[in-house]
Amino acid sequence: MNLPEYECPAYFRPYLELVSEDILTELETQLLQYPGFLRSIPIDKELYRYAQNKWSIKEIVGHNTDTERIIVSRALRIARNDQTPIPGFNEDAYVAATHFDDTSMLALIEDFTFMRKGTISFYKSLQLDELKRIGTASSKRVSVRSLFYFMVGHIRHHEKIIKEKYL
């Protein structure tokens, strides 16, 4: 997806390149496809780390759900015209503070599924003017719609890494 530069920071671009323009279809398709992919991962690979200080597959799955929670929260605030700058977050600190490796893959998948259903419901509630609203998150200008594209691209990015480096 190619959005105007004023709608998203440069670091979003690689994620947006992984997403088509029809974001609702993308969100709904990923709701089915991503959990299916995760269920296909052998149990003996769930805790695998391809290098020291890299996350396990379970930690990646938990990170993806946490990131979606944070991004949807940002989208809500900006859609509601909250112009308060939204701080960033340290993804490594978030993962380090969890017990994702002690959680079953099925529970992690269920958590993602519930989160994504809420994301889709929220997206459907928004009008075009709300999707185009711009706010500040992580010290960067960002539109509501770019955040939805980012969510899909972020999962695709991590899915690609899992396929290339973990499996």
Image: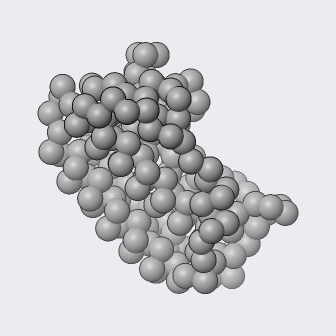
Closest to the observer, 119 or 85: 85
| Picture quadrant where residue 149 is located | top left
Which quadrant of the rendered structure holds the N terminus?
A: top left
Residue shown at 30% from the left, 40% from the top: 77
Vertical arrangement, residue 167 with respect to residue 13, above or below: below
Closest to the observer, 26 or 3: 3
Vertical arrangement, residue 87 with respect to residue 166, above or below: above
Residue shown at 39% from the left, 38% from the top: 147
Total number of numbered discs in the rendering:
0
Closest to the observer, 48 or 79: 79
Image side of residue 16 versus residue 99, left or right? left
Vertical arrangement, residue 124 with respect to residue 104, above or below: above
Report x, y in % for residue 138: 53, 35
Closest to the observer, 8 or 61: 8
Residue shown at 50% from the left, 26% from the top: 140
Image side of residue 158 versus residue 146, left or right? right
Image side of residue 98 versus residue 44, left or right? left
Report x, y in % for residue 82: 29, 34
Q: Is residue 57 visible?
A: no
Report x, y in % for residue 143: 36, 28
Q: Is residue 63 visible?
A: yes
Image side of residue 119 versus residue 37, left or right? left
Instruction: Specify the farthest residue to the front.
Output: 84
